[in-house]
Amino acid sequence: MEINANCKNEVLYIALVGEIDEHNATEARRKADKLADDFARSKSAVFDLQGVSFMDSTAIGFLIGRYKKFNRYGVRTYLTNPSQSADKILSMSGVYNLMPRI
Amino acid sequence: MENYMKLELLAVGENEAFARSAVAVFALSLNPSLSELSDIKTAVSEAVTNCIVHAYGKEAGENRIFIECKTEKQGAVGVLHIKITDHGCGIEDIDVAMSPFYTTLAEEERSGMGFTIMQTFMDGFALKSEKGKGTEVRMRKSIGVSENETERERVNA
């Protein structure tokens, strides 16, 4: 999984690209947490899932973990562009309650 | 028409993507929709990840995962049967392990949703486990029955 980020008007956009599974989440976790530290003064962070070609329940843990990390800095987090299958996993696990879909 | 395959894999993270893709390609002969295929890949990924992370844990790299698949086709309807077995630590209490959000590894950001996803995404699910002996997950997916034909995005026309 790759992570691309850019910040515009105090909103940090984080694009996740590729497959999210147990094997490849570790590196992405480290990168996303570094972004949280580097952009701790942003208003909000938007995770763009358009480029995610596959996810399993690892993504639930990954996203909730990042929600907690950003939340410590007072940065609100959102999700956008999930595929139909990503949406199924995110809906059933209640991730949208923490990170609303926009 | 029936088909069968058996895979034996080293229990390492690199094989998670291989395992789910292999089962998905095997299922292609049943002409699944993209969403059916995605359900299958996710369920297989959950089961294989469980073998690596929970069943074998630190000894994962020295142990193996066994995957057996069978397809049946009757007219337009197909059925995929999947059996995923490990010889790992086994599950102490199946009811507890299967409850949503239950995980033994919360500190590693595990969601505890693996079994819930397997049950929700597949049409049949059965779990057998013996402490110290291993675990067997059986799953079944019916292809081409639940969705309206006109809405189906065919993978292989």
Image (tube, coloured by chain):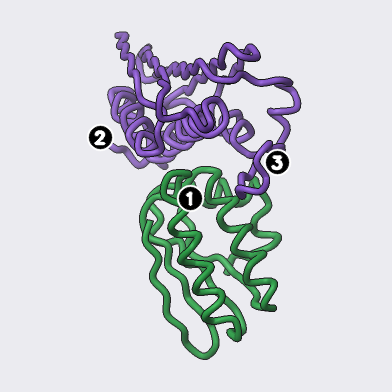
Q: Amino acid at mark 3?
A: Phe
Q: Nearer the viewer, mark 3 or mark 1?
A: 3
Front position in the image: B118 or A5 = A5
Q: Residues within 10 Å of mark 2 (few under 14, many from 20)?
A: few
Q: Which chain is purple?
A: B
Chain at numbered mark 1: A
Disc 1 crowd, CA 10 A, few/some/many (<14, 14-19, 20+) = few
| Distance from the alpha carbon under mark 2 to that under mark 1 | 19 Å
Mark 3 or mark 2, which is nearer to you? Answer: 3
| Kind of residue at disc 1 | Gln
Which residue is the site of mark 3?
B101
| Residue where numbered disc 1 is placed | A84
The furthest residue to the top = B1
Name the spot of residue B138 as percent of width and height, x first.
52, 17
Residue B156 has which mark? Answer: 2
Q: Quadrant of the C terminus of chain B?
A: top left
**With respect to residue A89, does B100 lie above or below?**
above
